[in-house]
Image: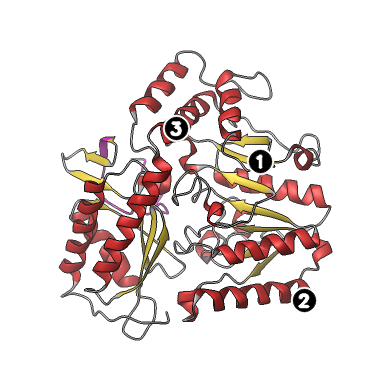
Amino acid sequence: MTTMSPLLKQATPVVVDHALGSWIHATDGTEYLDFTTGIGVTSTGHCHPKVVAAAREQCGKIIHAQYTTVMHPPLLELTEKLGEKLPASMDSVFYASTGSEAVEAGMRLARMATGRPNIVVFQGGFHGRTVAAASMTTAGTKFSAGFAPLMAGVHMSVFPYAYRYGWDEDTAVKFALKELDYLLLTRTAPNETAAFLIEPALGDGGYLPTPPAFLEGLRERATTHGIMLILDEVQAGVGRTGRFWGHQHSAAVPDILLTAKGIASGFPISAMASSTALMSKGWPGSQGGTYGGNAVAAAAAVATLQVIDEENLVENARIRGDQLQAGLKDIATRFLAIGDVRGWGLMQGIEFTTAEGTPDAATASALQQETTKHGLLTLTCGPNGNVVRLIPALTVSTQEIDMGLQRFEAALAALSSKVPAGRGSRP
């Protein structure tokens, strides 16, 4: 009997029959409030009627129209709609299928445009699982171990993880920028550095918002040295943080922007955007792909952007995110195993630490399983696996956030007699 690869670890035992909005209905009849959304993918909720209708209609016209062979209207319309959301300086888009592909396209363009070999990434970043993307990923060794040699030319600098260091945010930012300057003096000279690559809010690295002052410090250094600033908006983009793009919490504007996940409500499509002038510095033949810009995925993306605008979902993400964070911080006052609650919009992380201040992966993992038993689907993340992340759909309601908080606290209460609790200030 053929089975799924044993290397694929299921976060929950749930087998889905159907889903709608924030709810998953399992084959055994159980209903689950979904605060995972396919790791931030089903932005408009499961099976939004307008997205379903757009995909169904497109399936009846043409499913696969390879976009370097023939062009199709959904991709042209998507380019126009996406252009309305991009920074004003960005008027050129390349499409692929996955976030990893977009990341590698951005890295390739930066190297070609600058003629420089090196990429600076930041501790805790996740950029994908393909070889080049994994080489630039520092969210955990599991993403890059076992298939060396990795891509050369990657240098890692410090991320301003204030809670980990036991500092305030300003101190962490100053330290991280100082270390970056030192890296440029000791490891990769500015005239050999093609790009800084960073997420506006770390995903797998622990659901850590990147402080605006740090992004602005990167922008300043990139401009000074002719380095490209690449922002990986694969998880933080498309309304997730309560702004359409995660970097809009700061004044920093990227040279290259990457997006995927929530852009098409579950259909696989990704994009890399830049100015036409910069995009033109890529080498002929360096962009392409069989499935890039798939017609059905593009139609779903157009519908997704329309729904986000029509239903004011970016603002909903901000308001419901404030509600969610306030509720989590209130819960943290009653469960001292919670060391930190942080996030922007509907991208919230809860970090668990022991009484000694060390990462408590056991509690985070047990809680993630326990929430499933209480009808709430959650995930873990972070290099130590001690962060529970909550990723509701942008369509989530006030009542669903309240229900999610109630189920989250009930799961914590069920665990309280099984695991030691104690807040630590420094994991």
In the picture shown, does residue 155 fall above or below 41? Answer: below
Q: Which residue is mark 2?
A: 186
Amino acid residing under circle 3? Thr
Give the magenta part as a residue range. 1-19
Of residues 70 and 257, the one nearer the viewer is: 257
Q: Which type of secondary structure does the marked residue at label 3 adopt?
A: helix
Q: Is residue 145 visible?
A: no
Q: Gap in Å between the C-alphas at discs 2 and 1?
A: 35 Å
Q: Give coordinates of residue 73: x percent, y percent.
A: 58, 19
Quarter of the image where one finds residue 148: bottom right
Q: Which badge, 2 or 1, comes first in the chain's sequence?
A: 1
Quarter of the image where one finds residue 427: bottom left
Total labels drawn = 3
How dense is the environment of label 3, judged by Cα within 10 Å: few (below 14), some, or many (20 and up)? many
Q: Identify the residue shown where x is 55% and y is 27%.
A: 294
Left of 40 or right of it: where is 94?
right
Q: Gap in Å between the C-alphas at discs 2 and 3?
A: 45 Å
Q: Identify the residue shown where x is 32% and y is 80%.
A: 354
Q: Which residue is mark 3?
A: 304
How dense is the environment of label 2, judged by Cα within 10 Å: few (below 14), some, or many (20 and up)? few
Q: Give coordinates of residue 111: x percent, y percent.
A: 77, 51
Q: Identify the residue shown where x is 46% and y is 28%.
A: 300
